[in-house]
Image (cartoon, grey):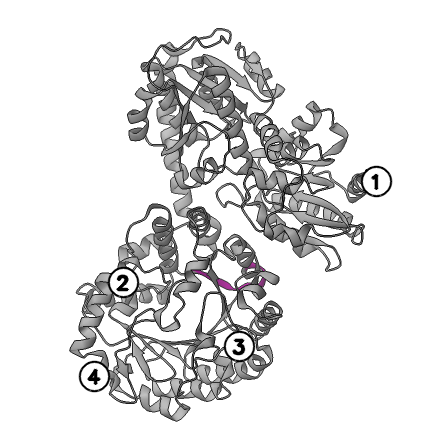
């Protein structure tokens, strides 16, 4: 470990145990100052009312120097300049000089801007950087960016804001200034957060995501109420900020901990555990001289032009106000202001998504799998049926017939929602099931999909834990493995086999409904899946390849189409032909050009034959996107291409990551749009009914498109082996319309696009 890093850790631990604001939670001199240099703003953002505030007195650079000379600010380590829009002050450079030369202990300075005045930043930034450098102060630029292109402009209510912000970002990067994108998340842009993260990676800068929240001094309560996240949006955002991709991009361990705490609160409820400097070590000063304990505080301590900042900060009245805030406001605060975590928690934040942590997790799963797997296989041998599939006899009970569904729930997407809908229909029709319980590893995600289903039996989502299974299983008529593949997922397979043994001990029949089998690399995984099939009273599989595997094991199984087809057919009839489009799609689909939907997925090592290095996977993906982009260019004036995500969820490899990667490869002349959303089944059907053709890479994107009888080009994502997509097209007699992702070429794509235009 470098000496400087060791010294930083030692200093942090010493501060934690010695400073009164930490362990003893006593008010100390502020180390952080949030400095609002103006109330004026040139935007009228949908989450903020600062631009509508009456103009108030603004301190001059000389007055600011006098204010900061007060002993209250003698131990300041960081000053964050914000507003309003700071660049509207023509004397901003002088204000920075006042700060730098008035605060002796200052280490870092940041400037937060909406980036709408790139020319002003081009003039200001070199001087600010020079001043900071002379005094040994680290300068950081924060640029607000809430979405790509028109999304950002609509949120900021100012045309051209996005282009200006990107230009400001380019200026900062060219000057080698440490830069951070700051995205305020609301219902207006929650599904576009991956686009912001993609831009941050593209420009090599950091990014921070924060929730739009109420701030009393801005009088924005009504605005926030109108754009606050729904429960499903909270679930989506929680998944995003706690995902490995976001944690990897987040360098500061305290920020990672803040994200994990916020994700927990959004999905499970509870109070805030994240610390905040503004409880005991922070203060905010407005441009008119009002001093606040924090940015969301209802009322100021007082005004620094009328009373000493030190006296205001340490007054008995402020102490009472601070205590009230800590007891009543802080527990429910969603603001991203953070503070000093305990050294132990900070160590956890440093390890969050660290390669060592990921390796340790895999080792724990592997240890459980290879230790418990053989034992459970041995104990379950007596439950093996080894007989042909038989119809289930009438279950004698006066209770409501209930099925407990297990599978890969918690990592599903809209395609899996359609599978679930189809499975529920089959269970009701074939086994007279009247109610379903779905056990999920992430119940908030599964609940998002189960609640979107229509005309299905009542469904309740529960956590997939040993405790919950033991509680509900005795009340269930059947245990059902439903939807999704039975494949090399060690942690999941161990849980499934454990649940199956519990069901067998209760004499509860086990059904395999609408599943696929494989692929496998581990013999133990194959043995567990075989045992699950042997324990089942009924097996219904969705592909001939899966049937062949079962037959090789000496097991009879019925072949039926993917359950998603059943549900899609039912919903298509229910919603009719070309129902009204969601508002967000109306402008995208309004064009005289042909419409071609695109769905792509990231490549995954599990679907490659043999072991490929990450760089090899990236090369295959890059080549594929280049070929696709070249084919799309050929139709730049005749086709509008619309990317539709089947899975924007981070857990299951977000499709949107490929959507933005494709966008980077396309010239501006190509008519390409990204549907930044998490659509449900009905919305995807409605979208596809407007398409003249599709190119699909996800298995269920292909099913959705084929179910709507749309000319569809399939991309098989298997590498050196055929995947489910290739199987689907082959079994449907459409083998000529599918190509491997590693063999695709633009000439073949051009030919297929031409057939769509001519159809």
Q: 59 or 350: which is nearer to us?
A: 59
Apparent side of residue 333 relative to residue 645 in the rendered image (left or right): left
- Numbered disc in front, either 4 or 2: 2
Quarter assignment of residue 756:
top right
Instruction: Provide the residue designation for mark 1.
Output: 758
Sequence-wise, the earlier of marks 4 and 3 is 3
Decide if residue 146 is on the left or right side of residue 294.
right
Sequence-earlier tag: 4 or 2: 4
- Please report the bounds of the magenta region as a residue range: 201-210
Locate residue 686, reporting x and y percent: 63, 41
Q: Is residue 209 magenta?
A: yes
State how far apart marks 1 and 4 are (Cα). 79 Å
Q: Which mark is residue 311?
A: 4
Q: Quadrant of residue 544?
A: top right
Dot 4 alpha-carbon crowd within 10 angstroms: few under 14, some 14 to 19, many 20 or more: some
Element carrying mark 2? helix
Q: CA distance from mark 4 to mark 2?
A: 24 Å
- Picture quarter with the N terminus: bottom left
């Amino acid at each position: 470990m470098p000496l400087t890093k060791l010294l930083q850790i030692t200093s942090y631990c010493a501060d934690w145990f010695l400073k009164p604001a930490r362990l003893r939670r006593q008010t100390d001199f502020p180390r952080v100052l949030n400095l609002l240099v103006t109330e004026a703003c040139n935007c009228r953002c949908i989450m903020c009312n600062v631009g509508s505030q009456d103009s108030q007195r603004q301190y001059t650079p000389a007055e600011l120097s006098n204010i900061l000379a007060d002993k209250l600010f003698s131990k300041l380590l960081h000053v964050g300049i914000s507003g309003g829009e700071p660049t509207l002050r023509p004397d901003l450079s002088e204000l920075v000089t006042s700060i730098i030369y008035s605060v002796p202990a200052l280490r870092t300075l940041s400037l937060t801007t909406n980036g709408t005045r790139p020319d002003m930043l081009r003039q200001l930034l070199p001087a600010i950087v020079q001043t900071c450098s002379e005094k040994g102060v680290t300068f950081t630029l924060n640029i607000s960016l809430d979405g790509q292109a028109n999304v950002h402009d609509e949120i900021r209510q100012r045309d051209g804001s996005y282009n200006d912000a990107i230009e400001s970002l380019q200026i900062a990067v060219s000057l080698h200034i440490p830069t951070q994108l700051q995205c305020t998340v609301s219902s207006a842009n929650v599904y576009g957060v991956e686009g912001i993260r993609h831009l941050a990676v593209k420009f090599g800068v950091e990014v921070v995501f924060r929730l739009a929240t109420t701030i009393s001094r801005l009088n924005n309560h009504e605005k926030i109420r109108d754009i606050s996240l729904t429960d499903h949006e909270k679930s989506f955002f929680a998944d995003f900020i706690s995902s490995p991709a976001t944690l990897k991009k987040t360098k500061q361990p305290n920020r990672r901990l803040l994200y994990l705490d916020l994700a927990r609160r959004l999905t499970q409820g509870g109070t805030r555990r994240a610390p905040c400097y503004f409880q005991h070590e922070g203060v905010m000063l407005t441009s008119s001289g009002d001093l606040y304990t924090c940015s969301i505080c209802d009322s100021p301590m007082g005004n620094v032009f009328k009373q000493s900042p030190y006296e205001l900060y340490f007054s008995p009245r402020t102490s009472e106000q601070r205590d009230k805030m800590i007891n009543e406001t802080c527990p429910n605060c969603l603001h991203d202001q953070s503070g000093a975590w305990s050294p132990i928690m900070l160590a956890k934040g440093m390890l969050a998504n660290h390669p060592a942590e990921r390796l340790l997790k895999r080792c724990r799963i592997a240890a459980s799998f290879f230790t418990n797997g053989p034992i459970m296989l041995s104990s379950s041998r007596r439950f093996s049926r080894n007989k042909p599939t038989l119809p289930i006899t009438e279950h004698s009970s006066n209770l409501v017939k209930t099925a407990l569904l297990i599978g890969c729930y918690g990592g599903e997407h809209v395609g899996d929602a359609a599978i679930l809908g189809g499975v529920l229909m089959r269970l009701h029709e074939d086994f007279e099931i009247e109610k379903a319980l779905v056990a999920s590893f992430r119940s908030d995600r599964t609940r998002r999909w189960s609640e979107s289903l229509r005309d299905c039996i009542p469904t309740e989502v529960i956590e997939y834990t040993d405790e919950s299974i033991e509680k509900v299983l005795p009340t269930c008529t059947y245990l059902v493995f439903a939807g999704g593949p039975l494949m090399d997922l060690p942690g999941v397979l161990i849980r499934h086999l454990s649940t199956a043994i519990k069901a067998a001990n209760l004499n509860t029949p086990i059904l395999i409904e609408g599943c696929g089998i494989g692929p496998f690399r581990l013999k133990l995984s194959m043995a567990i899946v075989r045992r699950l099939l042997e324990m089942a009273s009924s097996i219904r599989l969705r592909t001939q390849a899966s049937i062949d595997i079962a037959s090789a094991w000496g097991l009879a199984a019925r072949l039926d189409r993917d359950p998603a087809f059943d549900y899609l057919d039912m919903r298509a009839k229910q919603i009719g032909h070309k129902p009204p489009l969601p508002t967000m799609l109306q402008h995208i689909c309004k064009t005289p050009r042909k419409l071609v939907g695109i769905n792509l997925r990231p490549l995954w090592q599990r679907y490659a034959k043999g072991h490929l290095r990450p760089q090899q996977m990236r090369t295959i993906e890059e080549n594929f996107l280049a070929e696709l982009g070249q084919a799309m260019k050929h139709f730049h004036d005749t086709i509008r291409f619309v990317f539709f995500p089947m899975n924007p969820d981070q857990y299951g490899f977000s499709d949107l990551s490929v959507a933005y990667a494709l966008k980077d490869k396309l010239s501006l002349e190509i008519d390409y749009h990204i549907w930044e959303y998490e659509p449900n089944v009905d919305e995807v059907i409605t979208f596809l009914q407007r398409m003249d053709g599709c190119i699909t890479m996800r298995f269920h994107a292909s099913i959705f498109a084929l179910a709507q009888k749309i000319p569809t080009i399939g991309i098989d994502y298997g590498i050196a082996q055929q995947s489910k997509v290739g199987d689907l097209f082959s079994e449907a007699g459409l083998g000529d319309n599918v190509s491997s992702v590693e063999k695709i070429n633009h000439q073949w794509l051009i030919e297929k696009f031409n057939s769509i235009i001519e159809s």
